[in-house]
Image (tube, grey):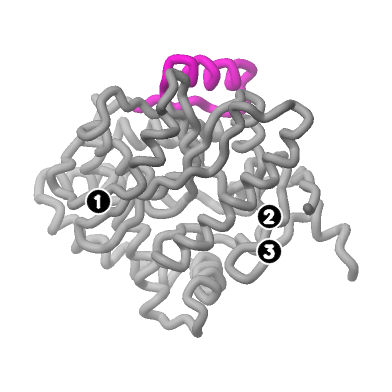
Amino acid sequence: MSSPSSNPHASAWMRTPERSNMAMLRVMTWISLRLGRPAGRVVLHFIAAYFLLFAPASRRASKAYLRRALGRPVTWADLYRHFFSFAATIHDRIYLINQRFDLFDIEIQGQAALHDARAGDDGLFLIGAHMGSFEVIRALGRQIPGLHVSMVMHEDNAMKINAMLAAINPQASTDIIGLGRIDSMLRVRDKLNQGAMVGMLADRSIGDDALLPTPLLGGVAYLPTGSFRMAALLRRRVVFMVGLYLGGNRYQINFEPLADFSQTPAGQRGAEVEAAVQRYAALLDQYARQAPYNWFNFFDFWQAPAAVSDTQPK
């Protein structure tokens, strides 16, 4: 197995300038909630076209990813569909946060895997990616009694999400645990002990997270290990979750068993974490090929980080 490498530099996705504008978000929220979802979706076509034409770095990254996922040359129509799918999931977040689940056709697959992992009283980790919409998990509350999900993310992102929620719905509440605090691990442990699910998106590294070179979509991806190391340290089960956008008002939520660290001896954690990352990469590969326009990594995801590339032969 390949050994993890450290990543002392800020990740490309964290260095990418934040293009979202709170004023525009408020305008979109007003249009969407006052004029309805069809009117809001008309605006999405202009937004997708704007980014396609005037965000060359994101366009290049989209093309590099889609070439792998589609296994063929990428057209402008493919690029537009990728950008539009991203805009659509962000737009639908407005309705999901406002609990307008009646507007959507949401299919759930693999619910038995989630039920089996929740058999005990302890909580578990739900690990996903920046693929589709994590927000659709809110709809599960209608079908799974007592479901509670706490999201774990970088502190800066947690602040942005809270600001976004306030812009969409001042009464909306979400349980976000920011990483980087002294008590972050303790808060995660407490939530798990209360039987909650702890959600994390594990496809992007956060600064100094250790990375594991892993086969993905015919290449090598450098995936962070932090989410899995946390699950192993806290001895919890892990379930993979993805909410795929299928077009129109259709979503498909998929659950897959990923790892079980509940009985892992301390001496075997490293090997089990690497196995979990590789299983995670295999699931990303599967769903990226199944729904290629759903993975929203608009940066050079395949570039080796400096700490790794500096050690490669010239």
Residue under the image location 53 percent in, 32 percent down: 237
**Given the image, on which type of amino acid does mark 1 rest?**
Glu
Q: Is residue 102 visible?
A: yes
> Does residue 153 appear left or right of residue 99 in this picture?
right
Query: Which residues, given as a range, are shown in magenta?
Result: 174-196
Label 2 to label 3: alpha-carbon separation: 7 Å
N-term-proximal mark, 1 vs 2:
1
- Residue 87 percent coordinates (x, y): 33, 58
Crowding at dot 1, Cα within 10 Å, few <14 / some 14-19 / many 20+, comes out as few
Label 1 to label 3: alpha-carbon separation: 32 Å
In the picture, the disc for residue 220 is: 3
Which dot, 1 or 2, sits closer to the camera?
Answer: 1
Examine the structure image and report whether residue 246 is included in the region drawn in magenta: no
Residue for badge 1: 107
Q: Is residue 190 above or below residue 174?
A: above
> Does residue 64 appear left or right of residue 266 in this picture?
left
Q: Is residue 21 visible?
A: no
Which dot, 1 or 3, sits closer to the camera?
Answer: 1
- Secondary structure beneath label 1: strand
Crowding at dot 3, Cα within 10 Å, few <14 / some 14-19 / many 20+, comes out as some
- Residue 94 percent coordinates (x, y): 25, 43
Residue under the image location 80 percent in, 55 percent down: 308
